Amino acid sequence: MTAELRTDATPLDPAALRADFPILDQQVFGHPLVYLDSAATSQKPQAVIEAMDAYYRQDNANVHRGIYQLSERATAAYEGARAKVAALIGAPDPRTVIWTRNATESINLVAYTWGRKNIHRGDAIILTEMEHHANLVPWQILTQEQDGDLEFIPIDDDGVLRLDVFEVLLRLRPKLVAFTHVSNTLGTINPVKEMTRMAHEAGALVLIDGAQAVPHVPVDVADIGCDFYVFSGHKALGPTGSGVLWGRRELLEAMPPFMGGGDMIREVHLRRSEWNDIPWKFEAGTPDISAQIGLGVAADYLRNLGMDRVREHERELVAYALETLAREIPGIELYGPPADIRGGVVPFNVPGVHPHDVAQVLDRFGVAIRAGHHCTMPLHERLDLAATARASFGVYTTKADIDALAAALREVQRLFA
Ligand code: C6P
């Protein structure tokens, strides 16, 4: 299924892995594609594409309904994917893995169900200044509706969370602390286990946004000790439309359902209904069956690579990128913490050139990056930046990709000189 076999001692060989990702083998404006936007969405290995194709060619049927072979095969693949994802994130029980469409929906699910039941007037929720809008706006909606309060852990100038201030904020006895595992904009890897311990000591529950962590660093929800953990499949080598909410069993069982309809019920009468068991209680309507099957294959693919090796590969790439860009691009502004505590994300600005112009010129050289506020407007405000350009990496990113980025950035500077 992959060009590589996992052996923990050997480093990842991204050049060999690229053979598994058919999309990478193409030219853009006459240049080989250099894909440096994996934080927005990752590319998909052949194994994921084939699994989805096979589902539609051989097994397409609705799940949990039919008493015939196709439906039984579809149901087995769909439910089997839960166990694969549970294994990737260290979830002790696959039934605590809820399928959603993406990280955004997972966070909204918790805000609408747990939140409306548990957050009342004056209750505090603590977030951080570096949150993606997906882990900010649902809590704004909730606290505005329920008359609760939001507080924020600030960052220092390198984009590292001020745990000393967090400690003080915890005296507010918040009901929930919600934070990102890895920042999508600065790449900061937060000390999630320590933060979870601190929050629990203050009596709060903990939700972790793992959208930028699951594809890049080892994740073990049992070891972290958190209460909810969410991520998007499409950033983790899986298809769009696949997402995950993991939660502690007792919490999920006590939460009211999110949406009403088929599959989430046990019994329906004209004036009342009884809910299904978890995870199905939260999965109303026909789900995105092929997407979740694809995500299961992606989870196996990542596990097969070994997440320690993936992390080491990206740490090395970040160190190489910071060094190469600082050396090759005079005046470049680089943001974020050192490579040791940073995922595969490198935000920057070329002085005198708007990041959108940077991205547009890079595209002419086949280099795909993102430019803008990356759905972290408050973080950009805090850093006093209107926008940034961002290169982000995946398992298939090579040092040659970073060299190509540096070469194209020299052209940007020449053009705008
Ligand atoms: N960040 C980026 O380019 P969805 O859209 O639900 O799949 O993911 C939302 C999300 C939540 N948390 C974090 C930390 C994220 O990075 C993202 C998505 C993309 O950075 C698209 S804005």
Image: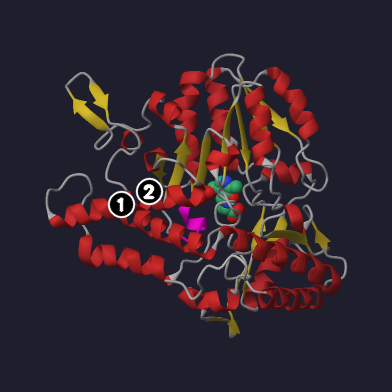
Return the x and y of residue 1 as percentages of the image width and height: 41, 71
Is 18 located above or below residue 293 in the figure?
A: below
Towards the viewer: 80 or 134: 80
Is residue 295 visible from the viewing direction of this image?
Answer: yes
Indicate the secondary structure of the residue bearing disc 1.
Answer: helix
Front-lying residue, 9 or 313: 9
Of helix, strand and loop, which one carries label 2?
helix
Q: Is residue 314 magenta?
A: no
**Three-letter code, disc 1:** Tyr
Q: Which residue is mark 2?
A: 82
Tell me: residue 392, above or below residue 66: below
Image coordinates of residue 94 in percent, x first then y, are: 39, 43
What is the distance, in whole Å, between disc 2 and disc 1 at their CAs?
7 Å
Quadrant of the image containing the C terminus: bottom right
Bounds of the magenta segment = 232-238
Residue 274 lies, in percent from the top left, at 25, 24
Cβ of mark 1 under 8 Å from ligand 1: the answer is no
Q: Nearer the viewer, residue 247 or 259?
A: 247
Mark 2, residues whose alpha carbon is within 10 Å: few (<14), some, or many (≥20)?
A: many
Rendering coords of residue 343 (x, y %): 67, 56
In the image, is residue 158 above or below residue 329? above
Q: Residue at horizontal 87%, vertical 70%?
A: 330
- Amino acid type for the residue under numbered disc 2: Arg
Q: Can the viewer see residue 288 in this picture?
A: no
Which residue does the numbered mark 1 point to in the structure image? Answer: 78
CB contact under 8 Å: marks 2 and 1: yes
Q: Is residue 409 left or right of residue 394?
A: right
The figure's colour scheme reads secondary structure
Say the numbered circle drawn on residue 115: none
